[in-house]
Amino acid sequence: MLKKITLSLTLLCLPACAQETTPAMPDGFAHATDYVPGLVQEIRYFGDNNFVGRPIDGYEAPECILSIEAAEALASAQEALSEFGLGLKVFDCYRPQRAVTNFAEWARDPDDTSRMADYYPNVPKDELFERGYIAERSGHSRGSAVDLTIIDLATSEEIDMGSGYDLFDPLSWPSDLRPTADQRANRMLLQRVMVDAGFNLLDEEWWHFWLTEEPYPDTYFDFLVE
């Protein structure tokens, strides 16, 4: 009889115990749209329009979550662009550690190359780690990094940056000279407003910025994007 009672209590505990393993969004974080009026969200890892070709672990909603400090800085960049009839579109913000692990697992699977033509046409998949395109950790998991571009507010269209988002290729480097003069000028505009707002630029990705004074420089979070 005692064994039956113990088993019943264990089964009743399972849903609650499972919930406890997934931490809630901690204090100090916020949905960016609560701070950045008019921010457009196209969270690529929530759907299948990404280099893996399917939704990524940890993305339960197409929402941009950032540290409050990063969200406030992003609002400054948005305000600066609005004077020119332009605005920001975000592709990724806070990224759970489980999503980064998901990327690493995908990168180790040599047979899954369904999105090679769109995202890494010039890089052998077995070199993605070596070349730094995939890693075991990401600054996004610290909560103050953002991937984004600029849109024309009148048309909601992205301005031309010379390469697509998440293209694993030197063409995506901000310093690459192959884009046209107009495309390079568009990249420079994005860099200028983001740096002026307090962000740093990643040398290998024109779309990636992280807050200079990030509040959690040594913490890699794993709460869900909801």
Image (cartoon, rainbow, N blue to C red):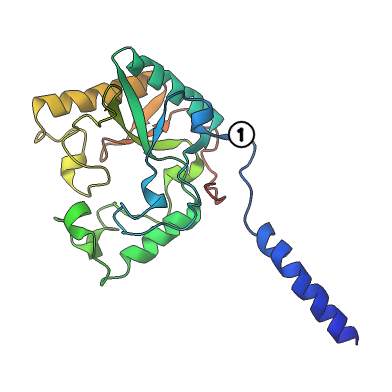
Disc 1 secondary structure class = loop
Residue at x-position 30% and y-position 23%: 153
Residue 185 falls in which quadrant of the image?
top left
The residue pinned by badge 1 equals 28
Residue at the limit of the structure toward the front, as seen here: 155
Q: Quadrant of the N terminus?
A: bottom right
Residue at x-position 26% and y-position 71%: 110
Residue at x-position 27% and y-position 36%: 203
Rendered position, 20 above or below 79: below
Residue 29 falls in which quadrant of the image?
top right
Q: Position of residue 81 (x, y in %)?
A: 33, 18
Residue at x-position 29% and y-position 55%: 51
Rendered position, 180 above or below 54: above
Which of 162 and 196 lies nearest the eye of the viewer? 162
Residue at the limit of the structure toward the right, as seen here: 1
Q: Is residue 18 left or right of residue 156?
A: right
Residue type marked 1: Gly
Q: Is residue 176 left or right of residue 101?
A: left
Q: Position of residue 189 (x, y in %)?
A: 25, 21
Q: Position of residue 171 (x, y in %)?
A: 16, 41
Tell me if mark 1 has few (under 14), some (14-19) or many (20+) residues whose alpha carbon lies within 10 angstroms of its own.
Answer: few
